[in-house]
Amino acid sequence: MSLRSNRRQWGAVAKSFHWITALLIIGNGIFGLCMELAGSPMRKINWLALHKSIGLTVLALLLLRVLWRWLDGRPQEDPAPRWQKVAAHAVHGLLFLLIAALPLSGWWFNSIVGKPLQFFKLFNLPALAQANRDMSPVAHAVHEYLFWFLVLVLVPHIAGALKHHLVDRDNTLLRMLPFRRLRNGAPSQGEH
């Protein structure tokens, strides 16, 4: 598998960014929802610090992914009705926006609460806003609602990939899966 994308499929670097980011977001989302199960206050503080560091990792990976996408390009799009292409671009754009907004809103929430933000206990990041405990419920709600909005937007993204794979039987999903070969004879990039 090539590191770079070609006209038929995504390269290893683009696939790695996609799947590592997806796993981190899903895992960190579940982790955030389970925070109350920490038990002891010290364990909750440690879990929260890990949750924040993973969120910052997602933000850094997104920035690297956008840079790589600019340098690497992308495979050609499969022929599809215009509305499907517009919907796919809208969902992808919204996903990228939410993947950035979610950790940024967590960073903002952390700043509003007035806590230091450490990246895996290696270094501190600056606050995005002045501490303002009165605003903390709003900041927390923004962060939580952004997570649920991201989950909502993931539904058509996953459903579209499964539709291409199971109904259309094309290579749309396969070209993003690691270690999978494209289907022979299946419609793929630029083969129509």
Image (cartoon, rainbow, N blue to C red):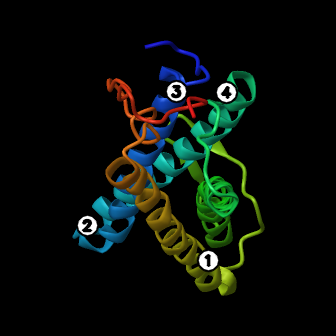
Q: Looking at the image, tell me whether mark 2 or mark 4 is earlier in sequence order.
A: 2
Q: Quadrant of the C terminus?
A: top right
Q: Where 11 falls versus 67 (above or below)?
A: above
Residue 167, position in %: x, y? 35, 55
Amino acid found under the numbered disc labelled 1: Val
Amino acid found under the numbered disc labelled 3: Gln
Q: Quadrant of the N terminus?
A: top left
Q: Are marks 4 and 1 in contact (CB under 8 Å)?
A: no
Q: Are marks 3 and 4 in contact (CB under 8 Å)?
A: no
Residue 156, position in %: x, y? 49, 65
Amino acid found under the numbered disc labelled 4: Trp
- Tell me the mark number nearer the camera, choosing from 1 and 2: 1
- Tell me the mark number nearer the camera, choosing from 4 and 1: 4
Q: Which residue is mark 1?
A: 142
| Residue 142 image-quadrant placement | bottom right
Residue 159, position in %: x, y? 41, 61
| Residue 135 image-quadrant placement | bottom right
Q: Secondary structure at mark 2?
A: helix
Residue occupying the point 64% across, 52% down:
96
The Cα atoms of the two marked residues, 3 and 4, are separated by 15 Å
Q: Left or right: 187 with respect to 77?
A: left
- Tell me the mark number nearer the camera, choosing from 2 and 3: 3
Q: Nearer the viewer, residue 122 or 179?
A: 179
Amino acid found under the numbered disc labelled 2: Ala
Q: Which residue is mark 3?
A: 9
The Cα atoms of the two marked residues, 4 and 1, are separated by 29 Å
The residue positioned farthest toward the top in the image shown: 2
- Mark 1 crowd level (few <14, some 14–19, many ≥20, 10 Å Cα): some
Residue 106, position in %: x, y? 59, 63
Which label sits on residue 38?
2
Q: Looking at the image, tell me whether mark 2 or mark 3 is earlier in sequence order.
A: 3
